[in-house]
Amino acid sequence: MSTPFTNPLSIPVLGFCAYSGTGKTTLLKKLIPELNNRGIKLAVIKHAHHNFDVDIPGKDSYEMRKAGARQMLVASHIRWALMTEDEVDEAPELPHLLQQIEQDAVDIVLVEGFKKLELPKIELHRAAHGKPFIHTHDSNIQAIACCDDTQVPSELRRLDINDVGQIADFVIEYAQNWQPTSKLPLTPQPPECGCELDSSKTLSVCQGIEKILSYVTPVTEHKLVELDELNGRVLAQDAISPVDVPQQTNSAMDGYAFNYSEPMLESYTLVADVMAGHQYAGTLQAGEAVRIMTGAPVPAGADTVQMKELATESGNNVSFQGDITLGQHVRLAGEDIAKGKTALAAHNRLQAPEQGMLASLGFGKLPVFRRPKVAVFSTGDEVCEPGEPLKASCIYDSNRFTIKSMARKLGCEVIDLGIIHDSEEALADALSQAAVKADVVISSGGVSVGDADFIKLALEKVGQINFWRINMRPGRPLAFGQIGDSLFFGLPGNPVAVMVSFMQFVQPALRKLAGEKNWSQTMVPAVADCKMRSRVGRTEFTRGIFHLAADGKLHVTTTGAQGSGMLSSMVKGNCFVVIGEQDEQLNPGDTVYIQPFADLL
């Protein structure tokens, strides 16, 4: 599937496209000096399918960028370079990249990659590779640079892939004949009615998430809840610390507290022992020290602690060894959290670490948002309730239970509506009743193209549908819509596809609905230990098993067969390997990104 492209520049842009291994970069490395020798000033944009860095660790520019500078510009009398940190989920948009080019300084822009764009291109082809032609489904191919064994349609310009001079002639000819496209005013498009029923409409994973989140309005109702009941809840107001943490300046280890001086004294007189929970009432004088335990208050007159392992006692005196610096091993009052400061901001989800910290500050109750209510049901006459006899040609309902478990793990209140059989009337009634009770209604089954589609008809009757297809596997069919003030998710029927779809689309919606802010899906780089295939233009969620290898890096392999009905692959696995839309194949040793199951499953 191609993507529309409009050249934003007043100079020509010409792409070079080919399958991996054909030699795009090799050709361009020869073509660029050839064009330069002919007086052509070039800009080149290369699309990388992986993370990269043009800077060197240790250099000032690298360190400033890693410290948080979104843009870093380095300049000298020879060259200047602008590096921009702009992490996006999708491939960068070529029109945006082109607008960074100083078009007054170049004659033409050559582009390597972006073969899905409706961009004028030269196709590179080698018959020996056995790859299909690109021109058969891309009308933007201007010429084919190929080997002698390649048969080219008569209507297409043929170039010799090994004759750089001939290809340079074509580039110059193209640039000379190029005319900018007149920019006609765009025809106004009617607003989306929210009831899009065109099952051919497709979205990327990121587009789907963005659309869904645009419909989510976080809950605002909140109440005070006991500290012990806060796990999984979302904080509704900032928690302001009523005390300093630590409350008193104290020792960070077992040792000796004294007043630092330069030079240090040869020995100090021990005047007391200070245990945790107790304090020395007096003020230490010069030449005095106390034995002190970890967490015990540092006495007045002392400012430094030396660990007991680097101290020697002799009678009532103690001497120290090793390097000593002023203030070492001393924790200052309020250095962790100062009294009156925000200990934990609102909209954070509370788990064990947050509960422990809030308990240490003395909080007994805290305001949290109410739990989102989620109604869940399964559809299909072929679905049976677990625990009951299995009918002929039927299957047990597993999806409802995985959905309920994931929703509860996100702190939701779950309403189980059971199994609704295939009937437009029954489904419409179930949807209407569920929307009255719940913030979100989730069904599984009946949304794929070619099904009886009762759920689609029922939803059209009581609510509205927003989209149906996502460019992903598993989980391509996905219905999202609204029933009154409630959101509706129609998940696929295949068990693995249900969990993938929930994790990618329902999870961010429920987190936003619950009041959680600044959450993002955990993505961790790992090294592939096996070959993984996908299809360009589709995001693949492969079940994987990751582990920490002897090289100190995370490595991942697949669980084996990847059928979307194979629940055993989810049980064996501990992550999804996310194969992006731009990747057709990942090989052993490639860097991949994984989504660990630990956040939700």
Image: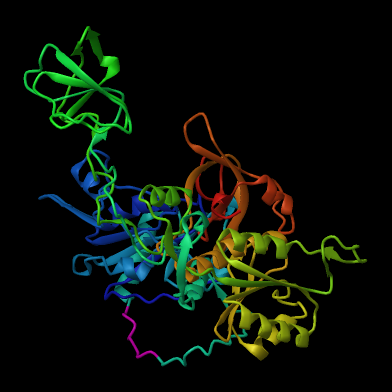
Does the rendering let one see residue 537? no
Q: Is residue 317 left or right of residue 457?
A: left
Q: Is residue 340 left or right of residue 425?
A: left
Judge whether residue 181 can be spotted in this image: yes
Q: Nearer the viewer, residue 520 or 322?
A: 322
Rendered location of residue 92, percent (x, y)? 39, 64
Whether 220 is drawn above or below 586: the answer is: below
Residue depicted at x 46% and y 50%: 23
Residue 414: name its quadrant: bottom right
Q: Residue at x 82, y 61 (%)?
A: 386
**Residue 588: quadrant of the picture:** top right
| Residue 115 covered by magenta stretch | no
Horizontally, is 593 left or right of 574 in the view? left
Image position of 197 (left or right of 92): right
Q: Position of residue 142 (x, y in %)?
A: 45, 70
Query: Is residue 183 magenta-colored?
Result: yes
Q: Nearer the viewer, residue 344 or 195?
A: 344
Q: Main secondary structure of the magenta part?
A: loop
Residue span colored magenta: 179-186
